[in-house]
Image (cartoon, helix red, strand yellow):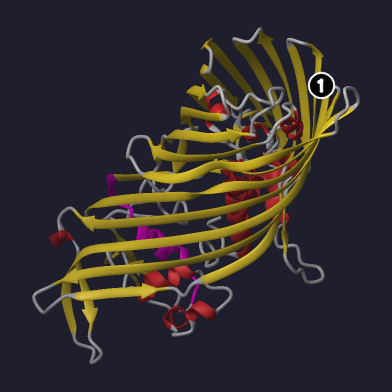
Amino acid sequence: MKRIIITIGIAASATLLTYAQSDVTFAERLGANQYYGTARTMGMGNAVTAVGGDLGTIGINPAGSAVFNYGQVEISPGLSITAGQPQARFALPSAGFSLCFDTGRREGLRNVTFSFVNNVTNNYLESWNASYQSDGTSFFANAAAAAKGIRSADLASASAYDYPDLDWALISAYQGKMMGGYGIDGVYLANNELLAEKDGQTYHYVPGTLNQFSEIRRYGTKNDMVFNLAFNMSDRFYFGFNLGVPIIRYNYDEVFTESPVDREQFPIVFKTSTGQEYTALFNSAKYGYSYASTTVGVYAKAGLLWRPLDFLRIGAAIQTPVAYGISERYANNVSSLFVGDEGSVRGNASSPRGSYDYNFRGPWRFNVGMTWTIGQWALLSADYEMAAFGRTRYSEKSRYAGEDYFSDSNKAISLFLGRQHALRLGAEVRPLPGFAIRAGYTLTGSPERIYTDNLGQSVDVYEYYADWNAFDTGLRTLKGFRYKNSPTWSASFGLGWSSQGSIFVDAAVRFNSFPTYTYFPYLYGDYAAVDKDNRPLPDASSPRLSINRGLWDLTVTVGWRF
């Protein structure tokens, strides 16, 4: 959650509103499930609410472990590869065991099954970079505008990072020689801007075209450790319970650089400690941000599976909200280089490693499914799942009387997140004894709401907080809403082999397509930029990058039934 560092240097209200926007996105990321499981369940699109008999089904329906009257152990190593700009990471989508205890009865309670499984339920792997150019705006000019009103002595202080109301990115930009003050204290320009005067007015501007480069890397997984107990009643009715302990390890690294197309257009005047002035040309500047979080939660889940006919199974499950505790670590750095005849000027500033701990409550989940078997040679399955994101909430680890730090974020969640719906389809065909072919498809909708206001305009969470004053004063009001049309989908294919004894081997490949999103490299949104003649630029906003994310998953399961 890119939240503690980014906007503290602006007015407090703007800070909280920016948090609210990013916290909505982070709540959706924390609460989302992208099921992995074994190669068999992945190959079938995880449409397994009413399938059972495989350790990969337990996290989706706790009753699934009671379907077969034997124990099993399996391990499923895997590989995930980003599409477009490939980055690969090994993972363990599933590993676990089940123990089946036979009561010896023909009717009533026939079997009790205890299982433990560790299933991956989300993968955050993403990697991309982009090069582009900007005329008239700069990442660091954007930061300089955001620093207005902050005393330069505070930004320059050796203990600046200890000040609770200072933005770490602004401190690093100032101490990394990428912005400086002029005129009255609290007014800044970037050190790739020039200072000018016209008609008695002093102003600053970006004098030439800048090459800009953005790079983003995300990685980490959500692993659900599941303790399961399930019961088989007369081979017709099965029910089970899970105690789940999800562990999320999430890492985010961001790099932004800019350099002039023609550095001769960027002569920057520096002063020595003795007051002597000299000129150096702006050569390059870099901003880096790193974030890591460890999240541990707990939830309960109950499920049932009913076989009213020999060829038909019906299943359902409900999961309580996950109670998460989140621990974050973050830092940033700025470096700059200016070259001149009298030598180079370098700037380097790094923040300390910050930390923040808080709580999050995830969504309720409910899923139902149906499976139709065709003799011994085929089955078809379909699942529906719903998650109530509108009821997710942040909270402080410790809260002082009268304080509610997350009130704006939780209000934004209530307004702009609702229900998420998912449809999963799967098939398995056994053309030969011991051999299976599988295919699956999953379509998951977005829980994000888009409103229509009293002016007939569309309003998402970003527009709402960008024009907060108009909504707060009633000039704009929210009317009806629709859900954002940005689904996630995946398609999978798998093969399986089972010996006449107890060994089985499965393999699956899946492609995941995620919604296109817009990335804004500048930290502080729009700002008032002018050209060399002090004319306002018509669009002084951050560049907008359209990001398409795709991910390939490959998994092999090796198991033994006993």
Q: Residue 151: percent from the left, percent from the top?
A: 48, 79
Left or right: 1, with 410 as reference point:
left
Q: Residue 340: percent from the left, percent from the top?
A: 12, 73
Q: Closer to the camera, 179 or 306?
A: 306
Q: Residue 551: percent from the left, percent from the top?
A: 43, 35
Position of residue 383 relative to residue 14, above or below, is above
Q: Closer to the camera, 259 or 229?
A: 229
Is residue 455 inside the magenta stretch? Answer: no
Left or right: 410, with 464 as reference point:
right
Query: What quarter of the picture does the N terminus occupy?
Result: bottom right
Image point (49%, 74%), residue name: 150
Q: Residue 313's image quarter?
A: top right
Q: Residue furthest left?
A: 341
Label 1, secondary structure: give it. Answer: loop
Position of residue 475 relative to residue 384, above or below, is below
Is residue 148 inside the magenta stretch? Answer: yes
Q: Is residue 456 visible?
A: yes
Q: Residue furthest bottom?
A: 274
Q: Residue 276: percent from the left, percent from the top?
A: 19, 87
Q: Is residue 485 visible?
A: no
Which segment did they paint magenta? 131-150
Left or right: 302, with 183 as reference point:
right
Query: What quarter of the picture does the C terminus occupy?
Result: top right
**Type of the residue with mark 1:** Asp
Image point (42%, 61%), residue name: 289
Q: Closer to the camera, 334 or 238?
A: 238
The local crowd at label 1, few if under 14, some if 14 to 19, many if 20 or more residues have their Cα within 10 Å, is some
Q: Which residue is disc 1 drawn over?
A: 235
